[in-house]
Amino acid sequence: MRVMAQMSMIMNLDKCIGCHTCSVTCKQVWTNRTGVEYVWFNNVETKPGVGYPRRYEDQEKWKGGWQRNKRGRLKLRSGGRIKRLATIFNNPDLPVIDDYYEPWTYDYDMLTKAPLSTESPVARPKSLLTGQNMDIKWSGNWDDNLGGSQETAADDPILATMSEHVKMEFENTFMFYLPRICEHCLNPACVAACPSGAMYKREEDGIVLVDEDGCRGWRMCVSACPYKKVYFNHKTGKAEKCTLCYPLIEQGKPTICSETCVGRLRYLGLMLYDADAVLAQASVENEHDLLDAQRACFLDPFDPEIIAAAKAEGMEDDWILAAQNSPIYKLISEYKVALPLHPEYRTMPMVWYIPPLSPVVDVISTTNNDGEDARTLFAAIDKLRIPVEYLAGLFSAGDVVPVESSLRKLAAMRSYMRDINLGRDRDETIPEAVGMTGTEIEAMYRLLAIAKYEDRYVIPKAHVETARELEELACSLDTDGGPGMGGPTAATAAGPYGKTPGMPLNATVDNYNEMVGKGGERTKPTTPGRVNLLNWTGTGVPDGMFPPKASGSPA
Amino acid sequence: MNPLDILLWVAFPYAAAGVFIVGHLLRYRFDQFGWTSRSSQTYENKWLRWGSPMFHYGILMVFGGHIVGLFIPKPWLEFFGVTEHIYHLGATWLGSVAAVLTIAGLVILLIRRRLVARVKLVTTVMDKVMYLFLAGTIAFGTTATVLYQVLGAGYDYRGSISPWIRSLYGFQPDPSLMSDVPFFFQLHVLCATSLFLLWPFTRLVHVFSAPLGYFVRPYIVYRSRDGHRGAGAVKARRGWEKSELPREKAGSRR
């Protein structure tokens, strides 16, 4: 057994209002550069819909992810090592930029510089690739809110597997939003396909990254990722992808998409898993077993044996504590309401989703029935095959059982909590019907509905302090004027970091925060309003250095 | 042996080799981020799908042919039973296939680069210079082969050009070997030498990134955030190991 920690995300789809704030803030932070104009590390799709890039879920065409061969072994769907290198001069499965969309801007100058005329000036769209005028025909979310879906939604690869009746009726039946980022898979196909070995999974937190210096632009990762979440920067000739905002995560802060999420629907936390079990579990024969197979890779962070094994791997106590408090562990393993996106790709994705109950509730409401009554809801989940089967196509390889189970738990929470809110007696038969207790339902309600910031994001800081801080203390003679003579000079001492013993600190965001006490929790003194003497510069008497003078009552 | 011969067949090749080697080392050291094939496949794939594999497989065959013709001395091949006649047949027929693939592929790629607006716009000046010398080298080489080997009586470059190249490698340069070589072969050699001189400053560096390591590495790559940290924290840097009881220490190592 090899215990590893994985920073994971869960999105509660019932709360997504499709506002694209996550996409916009992500784009501003990561992809507002030349070469990645068409790239959205985070995008929000309307489902049913064709997605971004178009029809990316159709693996018959794009050959993404893994496949189990006749001998029961996993193979990349796009072929093995020899075929990959043989097709290196032209990747046969690579989406071209038009499968995403041709990026454009507008001729805004025209609006201010056009000469006086009887017609209003127009800002025409100009292609960012050629600079020519262009007709905009598609974009990252062209079918937002089912816009134009009569034309395009029939191309949705999941709808294609469902009956004709569904294809005709879905617009009147249901719609929901699906925000997507990189899945940071346990068994990443992009990493396996990279000929240069430039893509890797971080040992500490499982974040999948591209080494931009090692990438040679062979583009195999782009086609091998079944979620199409690795992108080709057409200006630098290198692959780029969602980084799970690792510079923030390392400081214990949530990703930009989570932080700015209006619906507060994203959860971040650790999952402990057994890295040695991943390959075998990803190779199970029946696609419907893949959900349980992935759950079987996860480890119980409360089990003393697991804790001991994790410590033997060098995991620190605060990380184990974070794994125990992880909202991800609660939603995946305790309440079992979260489900992975397309487990049939066999990459073991680690961004999971709580399927939306709203399509079911909406139907009940339009029939003037009580959308919060447990029995009505349960019956509707059983009866309404269209949303349930569609959700199963997304989250459980077509198996309706886990989707139904998850929806029933959400329905149970809805009606059990209504009784409490209305001051009625608790109906304990409701939680029993879904195999939970009233206490569990209430805890789940707090996590999903109240969703406090500190409950949603349980992110331990990366451990830089031990090694690097030891290095800073490396020579005790390195003080100002000391025999080492490497200490801070008068000039640096006057800087924002003040006068500190030891070697001068590197000016990075995290140690700046540590020093000035902005956001760095560890520098906060345990008593509010008091000064942490460890950070005292030695000059002057700052506020709070001494306790406030007793006002009237004897201290 | 006149000064021009020394300049063309000794000084220039050595200068090109020096720039080639030092240029690659420096670029590898200081420009990892710029070291890429700079693929344009995402812009356009209909022409590239044909042109790129044809050119690349063709040029690999051409490379193989040049290794056999230039670097393996004639007596060695004859020792293995490859007579002049067999060599000539192989060089002509395989060489023709390779040449057709390479030239057709290159023509497709050049037309694409000129006609597809997206691709044309990302073509740098260095790309154009490189294409000029690459196309020139291939054109002169093909012309020489057609003129002297196919239409003419046949020219035994393994008696002049090949020993000259090997004389450069042995640091015993003999420019006299090149002075009587037919004109188009001379042009081919000079053009190729110029290409090698330019090589480290062009996108051609991607040749040295042929990912042969892919055959032997495990599929999933793990890396630590900080070489000596993380799950690898058990492997503390020398001198920074935690204090542990000697017995525990022996037991806890993996």
Image (cartoon, coloured by chain):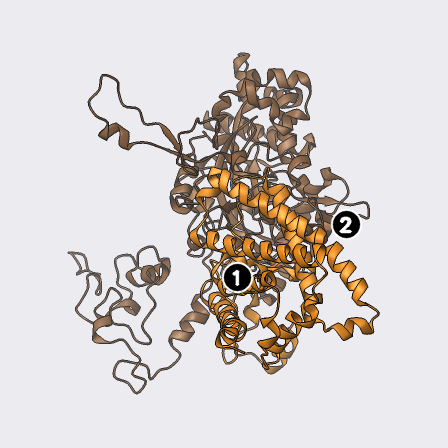
Chain colours: A brown, B orange
Rendered location of residue A31, percent (x, y): 42, 44
Rendered location of residue A371, percent (x, y): 53, 20
The answer to which of A336 and A88 lies nearer the viewer is A88
Residue A349 against residue A307 in the figure, above or below: above
Q: Which mark is residue A73?
A: 2
Q: Secondary structure at mark 1?
A: helix
Residue lying farthest to the top in this orientation: A368
In the rendered image, which residue does mark 1 sit on? B195
The answer to which of A219 and A145 lies nearer the viewer is A219
Residue lying farthest to the left in this orientation: A552
Name the residue: 72% across, 61% down.
B154
Name the residue: 54% across, 41% down.
B112
Rendered location of residue A171, percent (x, y): 55, 18
The answer to which of B206 and B105 lies nearer the viewer is B105
Hey, which quadrant is residue A406 in on the image?
Answer: top right
The quarter of the image holding the N terminus of chain A is bottom right
Rendered location of residue A127, percent (x, y): 41, 34
Name the residue: 17% across, 67% down.
A541
Q: Which mark is residue A317?
A: none
The answer to whether marks 1 and 2 mark residues whose Cβ atoms lie closer than 8 Å is no
Q: Secondary structure at mark 2?
A: loop
Residue lying farthest to the right in this orientation: B81
The answer to which of B174 and A382 lies nearer the viewer is B174
Is A241 left, or right, of A191 in this rendering? left
The chain holding disc 2 is: A
Q: Amino acid type of disc 1?
A: Leu
Dot 2: within a 10 Å radius of its alpha carbon, few (fewer than 14), some, or many (20 or more) residues? some
Q: Is residue B200 visible?
A: yes
Q: Is residue A350 visible?
A: no
The chain holding disc 1 is: B
